[in-house]
Image (cartoon, helix red, strand yellow):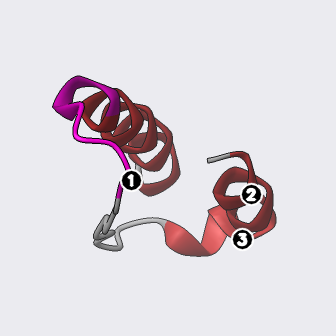
Amino acid sequence: MKTVIDRTYPRYTSMKNKEIYLIATAAVRNKQALERTIEGLRGFTSLLTG
């Protein structure tokens, strides 16, 4: 997640009014762990797309 944030942050102004799709994979079967990751990414992308 940190890598996504680090690589996206410099371009945040050009991401306004864009759709963002999240694709995730996991090596564990714990659905709650993956849901927390997705929610964290959704929170970050909601700040980018305003």
Q: What element carries label 2?
A: helix
Magenta stretch: dominant SS?
A: loop
Q: Where is residue 17 in the image (x, y as percent from the top left)?
A: 35, 68
Q: Which mark is residue 4?
A: none
Q: Which residue is under mark 1?
A: 27
Percent of width and height locating residue 12: 65, 62
Q: What's the residue at 34%, 62% (across, down)?
A: 25
**Is the residue 41 above or below the residue 6 in the image?**
above
Check residue 49 for magenta coloring.
Answer: no
Q: Which residue is drawn at 81% across and 65% down?
A: 10
Q: Residue furthest front?
A: 28
Residue for badge 2: 3
Which residue is labeled 3 in the image? 11
Provide residue 35's location: percent of width, then percent of height: 25, 33
Q: Is mark 1 on a helix, strand or loop?
A: loop
Magenta region? 26-33
Whether pointer 3 and pointer 2 mark residues with C-beta atoms closer than 8 Å, the reply is no
Q: Distance between the residues labelled 3 and 2?
A: 14 Å
Asked if residue 32 lies left or right of residue 20, the reply is left
Q: What residue type is labelled 1?
A: Ala
Left or right: 46 as drawn, with respect to 15: left
Is residue 29 on the magenta stretch?
Answer: yes
Mark 3: which amino acid? Arg
